[in-house]
Image: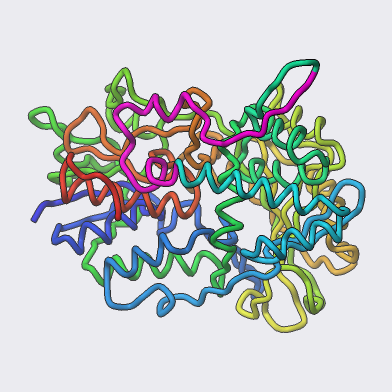
Amino acid sequence: MARIAVIGAGMGAMAAAARLAVAGHRVAVYERAATYGGAVGRFARDGFRFDTGPGLLPLPAVHRDLFVKTGKEPLEACVELVQVDPSSRHVFADGTAASLPNASRAGVVTALDEALGAGAGGRWGDFLVRAREAWDRTRRPLLEEPLWPNWEVLAERDPYPAVPHKRLLRTRRAGTLADIGAWELRDPRLASLLESHALAYGLDPRVTPASAAVLPYMEHAFGTWYVRGGIRELARAVHERCLARKVEFVFGAEVTGIVEKDGRAAGLELADGTVAEADHVVAGVAPGVLDRLTAGRAVRGDGDVGPRRGVPSRLTVLLALRGTRPEGTAHRTVVHTTDRQGELDRLFGEPAGLPATPTLTVLRPDDPGLVPDGGHEAVTLTLPAPSGLRVTESDVDRILGVAERAIPDLRDRLLWHETRTPDDIAQATGAPGGAIPAPALAAADGRLLHPANTTRMPGLFTVGGWSHPGGGLPHAGMSGALVAGLIVEGPDFRGSQ
């Protein structure tokens, strides 16, 4: 039985802790905050409750596997999962709207044809077929296996089977999401639908590789799910599973360094001067934090994927509304920008800032547990934002103006609002500027891959969104599975089955 010290109580770190405890190890988690969950937080006021991190759960099979492997009670016995239908409603720049059914290719094709005109659904359906091919080619190496030592293979070739496009006597293939929208979907509204999946992760579709087609495919193939009570309930359930497996949690414990002895990780130094000895250390922290904990030592090899820094963050506005949620309201509405180029230039240009009309996701869950009574509604607005963004009341007012395209009577019903900025994310996660990591993606010279879960310091492993396989709830769960496998089975571990 090995002693394992875990830094941070984020979702990936807790997933690793539960799996390692089941394997017979003695696991202690050290978290500088007063609670678990990392970015999966909660804000409560006046009987309203809101998720401050992700609001929906894609690919629930990852967490089902975690609960199957760590105890007798399955995931559904610990939380109530609800399949969201429609999966999303989209309000496009020209005012047209489409509601897309959950996990139904035929239903989506029909809905898009009816909303956008004959042929639109067929083009999107054909795109999903190609996206599935990219998913099949990359699912194992990007989700279920440790990062390959020869990861350059993943970086060089884009797995998306782009359709040849003839232009000015030249044949070209889509290399980015923007290319797919322009050349294959051939409708600005379909292009906007595609690009919204990249923007949700803070990715610029103009330079994001075509392999990112797997992002909308995951949602289409595996459905969109809501956890009754909010995603924070999933964090609670994972924490309780850890406790049931005898994982020890020490909250308010700031780690100031990783102890090295005889060339390997041997424990943690804490801010109060104590040392927690360990045979293995699992770090669920942002790259800059890891650098500090290792006193600047290069724990990544020269040929390794470098940690991604400076990626965009997220701005969240929580709305407490008087009045009941109208019957038939979509759980999720995406309000698309009316100025695509302006939005991308502001988000990813220099200096970066908040777009005048951002792409906005509006979450309106039908969940009595989130409101004081049936005469109120809790709404969450989210949009990508540059890391470190300073937000003014005029910024919030503009966001509310965009939200009125989805909630016309918003201002008449508004009781109060609460804004969660990139600085709030930075405080919760330790990531500079509140940066949020995207899922690992193939191609693009490895720019969207993440560092391996192993390091050059024996006994030190990394977990969570800043490590392979990157950000997002499913990826965090998979990172926990990968780290547990590498510790339990050793360097010959080849991934989950």
Quarter of the image where the C terminus is located: bottom left
Q: Position of residue 314 (x, y in %)?
A: 63, 44
In the figure, residue 414 lies in which quadrant? bottom right
- As drawn, 151 above or below 200: above
Residue 159 is left or right of residue 121, and the answer is left
Residue 380 is left or right of residue 98, and the answer is left
Residue 100 visible (yes or no): yes
Q: Residue at x 20, y 64 (%)?
A: 22
- Please tell me which residue lies in front, 100 or 320: 100
- As drawn, 288 above or below 399: above
Count of numbered circles on the image: 0
Q: Position of residue 142 (x, y in %)?
A: 41, 41
In the figure, residue 211 lies in which quadrant? top right
Q: Residue at x 90, y 66 (%)?
A: 409
Residue that sits furthest to the top in the current view? 169
Q: Residue at x 32, y 33 (%)?
A: 148
Q: Position of residue 152 (x, y in %)?
A: 39, 24
- As drawn, 413 above or below 297: below
What's the magenta region? 138-167
- Please tell me which residue lies in front, 70 or 186: 186
- As drawn, 372 above or below 160: below
